[in-house]
Amino acid sequence: MIAWSDAVPLFEMGLLDSLALFNLVLWIEERTGAPIDPTALDIAQEWGSVRDILAFVTARMGPQQ
Amino acid sequence: MSGACEIIRYRPEYKDAVAQLQTALWSPDPAANRRYFEWKYEANPWSVEPRIYLALRDGRLVGMRGCYESRWEVGSPAQMVSVPLADDFVVAIGDRKRGVASQILRAAIADLADSGIDYVFSLSAGMVTMMGSLALGWKSAGRVDPLVRREPSAAPRVRERISRMPVLWRWANAPILRSAAERRPFRALDTASSREPSLAIAREPRPEAMAELVAELGHDGRLRHVRSREYLAWRFVNPMHDYRFLYATRGGRLAGYLVLRARDEPPADGARLHRGSRGLRCARARRAVGDGNRSRSIRRAGGVGSQPGAGRARAAARPGLRPARPRAQCARLAVRARARDARRSSQRVVARRAPAARSRELGSANARLDGRLTN
């Protein structure tokens, strides 16, 4: 059983596969209105958990949004 | 059913199973896949032994990741480095979404690291595979922007419309929906003869002369394939592809060459310039692409594409080569991985063999690699 939390390592636990990651990138692009170049990121580090992804989105959009 | 697989190194008794598995990626014809496998992994001039990882579930082959050997030169004076190229990743259709992909990718990298390999390149990742690679710690080392030159034709639009129709979408890529140039992109080229005596059209590579020309031209230190006679002789006998060669000569010596490859991905849309082509530096070869009066055959081909560096991209634009798609959608990337980081991986390959040749010299050249890939 996985102890769910925002810090669960998504890739190491196999919770996010390549297709899901691809869809997630598209979804975040759509919701934020800003294109994402995944090759410019260290995906494994910067998107390693839900908390990391939220921090990434917050940093891109600014805290007021 | 458990999602766990056994990951092993390739053994010859699996060749037929690999040819069958690869009907999902290479060709629907297992015999053609077998020939391709033998060319790519067994006839490879740089190969020590095939570095192929297989995923087995209950003894059944359900996945594969291949790494074929490549040799590169970088810097001035050139430094030679050997790097495995990760490719040919496929999981059996019925076994997808069960973690096989992650297992085999992790195991392959871990085994390469244990074999003393510091870096692995991937030059052919589609967008989804690239995402998976990035999630496993791969880094992007550059983008390859393909160029195409297409003959105006209604066929692609017809296919696009049919692909959206109920029931009929199944036949959207049927051969009958391809234009004549798409079906046989070299037809006009094969029936034409160049009006310029110093320009020859051929079906066979001239590896000796090509290698001599490459050595004579030198290079600027960017990372590129070692284009030796052995490499060129192997590179252009890929049984999956159909090539034509344009040779420009000056004083009886080869002065430039251009390699065209018929695109075989459905829907076929013509021919493309091979990324290793040197000929765009040759004015005559360049004219041959763009000047229908001198070489109407190429002009009439369904289209040509290329993956050139910036200089050659500018040269290619003159005869009408344009980016195939917006940069953001370019799926073919060059990616490298620091394989030794993967040694912590818990996924291991069963029946590991003796360590292979090391390629640590790339580490010292690493600073020169970023953003300096060349074709």
Image: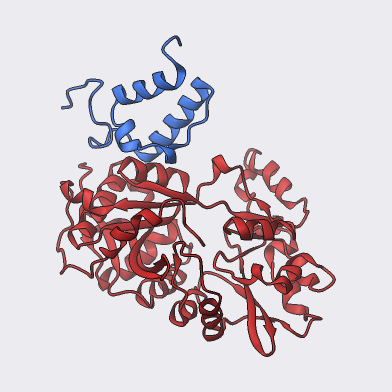
Whether B39 is drawn above or below B162: the answer is below
- Left or right for B171, reference A27: right
Residue A52 on image: x %, y %: 31, 25
- The image quadrant that residue B65 belongs to is bottom left
Image quadrant in which the N terminus of chain A is located:
top left
Which chain is painted in blue?
Answer: A
Q: Residue furthest right?
A: B293
Residue B108 appears at what percent x and percent y? Answer: 26, 55
User: What sort of colour scheme is used for the picture?
Assistant: by chain
What residue is shown at x 48% (from left), y 63% (from top)? B27
Which chain's colour is red? B
Q: Position of residue B160 (x, y in %)?
A: 67, 44
In the picture, measured across the screen, residue B145 lies left or right of residue B76, that is: right
Q: Nearer the viewer, residue B55 or B40?
A: B40
Position in image of residue B276 (x %, y %): 54, 68
Q: Is residue B79 above or below residue B147?
A: below
Asked whether residue B253 is in view, the answer is: yes
